[in-house]
Image (cartoon, rainbow, N blue to C red):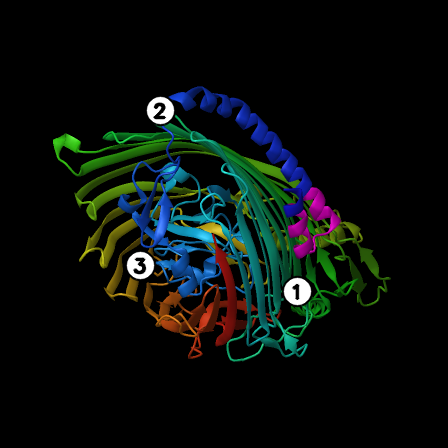
């Protein structure tokens, strides 16, 4: 274990601080392991004599995936009464899926856009998603939850399977699963042994190397170690610097220890580290082909995941415990005016510690009644340091506006900023904690009808969230230059800087039920009808302080100036950030409410012609109350905030087909349609967005593909040749709540699609793959937004899709 840790530390070039963090986490997990074993392992020893010496994990084959039974579900994964897609390791390899965003459009109504960096990886399912704030789709890796979308984009390596559950999953997964769930599972060293080395490269400076080893050291103990490194030179040139704006590097490693103490007891200890560094946010004007900004724009991230999984199997029941710890530390820099001028810049740093514990007890027999009960708890502590700077050109523009205002007033006075820069530093601590109890039951052969089953569940969820803020202005002082005829007066220096400090908190209680009916015609065919409730937590906007502090600074300058004037008694006003009787309170300006939904779904699954043809379909309707959306404050010059926007709904359908007409040939098609709109969203008496499309979520997703593998005669130089081609498309995508641009024209990204292809030759343990992504260099916009400059002019900016990428990958694999 120690050697494995040092191996990862060496490859990833960790500093001393990172090593201390890892050491502390392993001490915590070791203590947790000892405590859990103290309670669970004696039970296993006592019951070993009564337990049949059989495998502790149920497995079956589902589309080339060996799938273990879920620790939560009371139905087999292949017969769940919900829309689910399972992606196998072969499908990941054939479709060149190396991270979660690569799965975009591969699964029906599943979409992950690129917003210029890994700081935000929003997942949209069925038109439901979020760019900022709490996630709408949750991610679990080996049953351990991830608490921050900034941790969603990492390198896939040795993935055993990926599950995408679409529709609200609140009953078993709780908060922030309003759109669905993504479950990732990694390979076990007890079920897979071997070594793999990969070396790849391509255009745009692409280079990657990966290595992993899975060893079963004894009949009861296995260990796996893996590491990777990737880089590219970026794809979009910054005209100001003459260099690419988005070059990146990514390195990491993973360690898993697995112990099968007895047929009744198994333990896993796993840890991974991921490091990202490079340029970010290559946003350019819509009419340009190059980025053009002068301030640094980059993103660096350290991500640690550590987990402990314990499984005990008793007589007719099983107990599962997952303890998780996640540490995220990142550093984001952005030129917020996106121009060569020095107007606005931001440097956001996050440091987050997340601890979770879940215990489930589940029936483990072949009886008609199946059940699961569980408890979940978490603590999350996030500190955000977000200094915003108004730079030299911004100060010149602000001075011009101030001079014009004073001239219109006819005042014999000029107010002059004393500095050429104003800093708005702020530190925001956002702790949250929660607990939940849940239960789900499935009764088969309902009313004596063979194949008819009913599933019902309920969850009681509690969460406490808070914000502790401290923000101030630095450099906001002014000089008053008087011009009173006949009364010469010396300039007056006025202190303008202000400070805002305080804290707020709120509690949320939620009940999340689920109901489903299912009829199974045969072992390979079923139909279901379900209804489930989803819940997305509320919270506080730290980015709202950018605008609030600017207002407080202006009020402070006026208040101090009036108090210093001859005969002045001070200007009216309250505390910084305060409010009058007609204005919302500061807490109301900062907070947003929870989002709640009900999803109704009819679907089914069929396999025919000796399982050579499989069909999955679903028809759905989702109703969302208090939908959370992202708003640009002052057209992007004062940050972005989460706000509630009345009601919305999403309705549509999904269809997946897979056909194997001949040996070695496979065809697939996946299509999703989601019509997501605001139902009730009144901005003002003049603006009503009701009926408009929800922005950023595509109406259609489409994936078409084919794969063929040909075995050559014995003794040939190449033993196997395989080829794969895939078309993945999405659209249309609206970019604003109004569905129009600043000039009133309808604004959206039309449907677009890219073609990916690969050809692989294999000989023994070696394989050589030639691949290409976006083969025909399809042009499209991955992101669009509008931002105002200091003169009030609105400028449209875009993030363009990546160009054609091509390269080769050499693999050496030994499986034992």
Q: Is residue 479 left or right of residue 104?
A: right
> Image point 46% across, 43% down: which residue?
593
* Label 3 CA crowd tier, 10 Å (few <14, some 14–19, many 20+): many
Secondary structure of the residue carrying numbered label 1: strand
Secondary structure of the residue carrying numbered label 3: strand
Q: Is residue 238 left or right of residue 689?
A: right
* Label 1 CA crowd tier, 10 Å (few <14, some 14–19, many 20+): many
Instruction: Say whether marks 3 and 2 touch (CB < 8 Å).
Output: no
Residue wearing tag 3: 674
Above or below, 667 against 373 in this view is: below
Residue 128 in the image: state x and y as whole percent: 38, 53
Q: Nearer the viewer, residue 2 or 97?
A: 2
Question: Does residue 492 appear in this view?
Answer: yes
- Closer to the chain start, of discs 1 and 2, is 2
> Image point 44% across, 60% down: which residue?
112
- Closer to the chain start, of discs 1 and 3, is 1
Q: Quadrant of residue 54?
A: top left
Secondary structure of the residue carrying numbered label 2: loop
Q: Quadrant of residue 1?
A: top right
Above or below, 559 against 485 in this view is: above
Q: Nearer the viewer, residue 353 or 345?
A: 353
Q: Is residue 19 magenta?
A: yes
Q: Which residues are magenta?
A: 5-21
Above or below, 239 against 426 in this view is: below
Tell which tag, 1 or 3, sits nearer the viewer.
3
């Amino acid at each position: 274990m120690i050697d494995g840790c040092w191996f990862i530390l060496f490859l990833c070039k960790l500093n001393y601080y990172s090593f201390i963090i890892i050491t502390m986490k392993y001490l915590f997990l070791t203590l947790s392991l000892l405590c859990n074993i103290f309670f669970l392992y004696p039970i296993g020893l006592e019951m070993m004599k009564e337990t049949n010496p059989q495998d502790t994990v149920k497995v079956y084959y589902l589309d080339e995936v060996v799938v273990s039974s879920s620790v939560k579900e009371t139905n087999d994964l292949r017969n769940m009464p919900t829309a689910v897609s399972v992606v196998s390791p072969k499908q990941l390899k054939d479709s060149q899926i190396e991270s979660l965003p690569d799965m975009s459009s591969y699964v029906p109504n599943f979409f992950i856009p690129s917003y210029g960096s890994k700081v935000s990886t929003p997942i949209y399912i069925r038109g439901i998603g979020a760019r900022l704030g709490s996630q709408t789709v949750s991610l679990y890796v080996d049953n351990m939850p991830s608490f921050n979308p900034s941790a969603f984009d990492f390198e896939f390596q040795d993935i055993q399977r990926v599950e995408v559950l679409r529709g609200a999953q609140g009953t078993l997964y709780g908060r922030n699963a309003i759109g669905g769930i993504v479950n990732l599972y990694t390979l076990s060293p007890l079920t897979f042994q071997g070594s793999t080395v990969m070396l790849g490269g391509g255009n745009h400076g692409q280079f990657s190397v990966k290595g992993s080893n899975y060893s079963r050291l004894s009949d009861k103990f296995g260990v796996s170690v893996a590491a990777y490194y990737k880089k590219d030179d970026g794809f979009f040139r910054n005209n100001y610097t003459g260099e690419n704006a988005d070059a990146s590097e990514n390195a990491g490693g993973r360690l898993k220890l697995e112990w099968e103490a007895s047929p009744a007891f198994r333990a896993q200890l796993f840890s991974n580290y991921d490091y990202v560094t490079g340029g970010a946010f290559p946003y350019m004007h819509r009419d340009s082909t190059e980025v053009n900004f002068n301030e640094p724009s980059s993103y660096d991230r350290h991500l640690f995941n550590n987990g402990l999984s314990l499984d005990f199997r008793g007589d007719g029941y099983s107990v599962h415990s997952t303890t998780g710890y996640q540490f995220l530390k990142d550093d984001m820099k952005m030129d917020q005016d996106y121009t060569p001028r020095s107007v606005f810049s931001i440097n956001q740093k996050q440091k987050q510690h997340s601890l979770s514990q879940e215990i489930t007890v589940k029936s483990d027999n072949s009886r008609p009644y199946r059940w699961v009960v569980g408890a979940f708890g978490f603590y999350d502590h996030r500190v955000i340091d977000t200094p915003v700077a108004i730079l030299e050109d911004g100060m010149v523009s602000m001075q011009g506006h101030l001079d014009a205002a004073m001239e219109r007033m006819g005042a014999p006075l000029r107010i002059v900023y004393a500095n050429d820069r104003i800093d708005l530093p702020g530190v925001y601590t956002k702790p949250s904690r929660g607990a939940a109890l849940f239960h789900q039951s499935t009764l088969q052969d309902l009313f004596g009808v063979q194949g008819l089953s009913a599933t019902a569940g309920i969850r009681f969820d509690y969460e406490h969230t808070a914000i502790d803020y401290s923000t101030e202005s630095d450099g906001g002082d002014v000089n008053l230059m008087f011009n009173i005829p006949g009364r010469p007066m010396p300039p007056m220096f006025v202190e303008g800087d202000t400070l805002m400090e305080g804290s707020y908190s709120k509690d949320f209680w939620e009940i999340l039920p689920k109901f489903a009916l299912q009829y199974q015609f045969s072992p390979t065919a079923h139909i279901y009808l379900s209804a489930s409730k989803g819940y997305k937590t509320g919270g506080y906007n730290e980015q709202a302080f950018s605008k609030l502090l600017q207002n407080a600074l202006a009020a402070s300058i006026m208040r101090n100036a009036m108090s210093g004037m001859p005969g002045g008694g001070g200007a009216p006003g309250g505390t910084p950030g305060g409010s009058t009787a007609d204005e919302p309170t500061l807490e109301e300006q900062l907070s947003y409410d929870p989002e709640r939904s009900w999803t109704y779904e009819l679907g089914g699954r069929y396999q025919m012609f000796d399982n050579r043809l499989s069909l999955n379909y679903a028809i759905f309707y989702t109703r969302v109350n208090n939908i959370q959306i992202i708003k640009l404050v002052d057209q992007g010059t004062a940050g972005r905030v989460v706000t509630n926007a009345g009601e919305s709904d999403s309705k549509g359908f999904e269809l997946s087909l897979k056909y194997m007409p001949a040996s070695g040939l496979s065809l697939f098609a996946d299509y999703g349609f989601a019509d997501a709109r605001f139902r009730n969203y009144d901005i003002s008496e003049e603006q009503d967005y009701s009926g408009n499309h929800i922005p950023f979520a595509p109406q259609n997703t489409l994936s078409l593909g084919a794969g063929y593998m040909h075995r050559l005669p014995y003794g040939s130089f190449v033993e196997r040749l395989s080829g794969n081609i895939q078309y993945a498309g999405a659209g249309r995508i609206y970019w604003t709540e109004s569905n129009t641009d600043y000039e009133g024209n309808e604004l959206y990204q039309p449907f677009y699609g890219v073609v990916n292809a690969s050809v692989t030759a294999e000989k023994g343990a070696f394989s050589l793959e030639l691949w290409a992504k976006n083969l025909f260099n399809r042009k499209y916009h991955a992101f669009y937004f509008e931002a105002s400059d200091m003169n009030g002019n609105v400028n449209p900016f875009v993030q363009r899709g990546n160009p054609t990428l091509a390269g080769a990958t050499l693999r050496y694999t030994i499986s034992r």
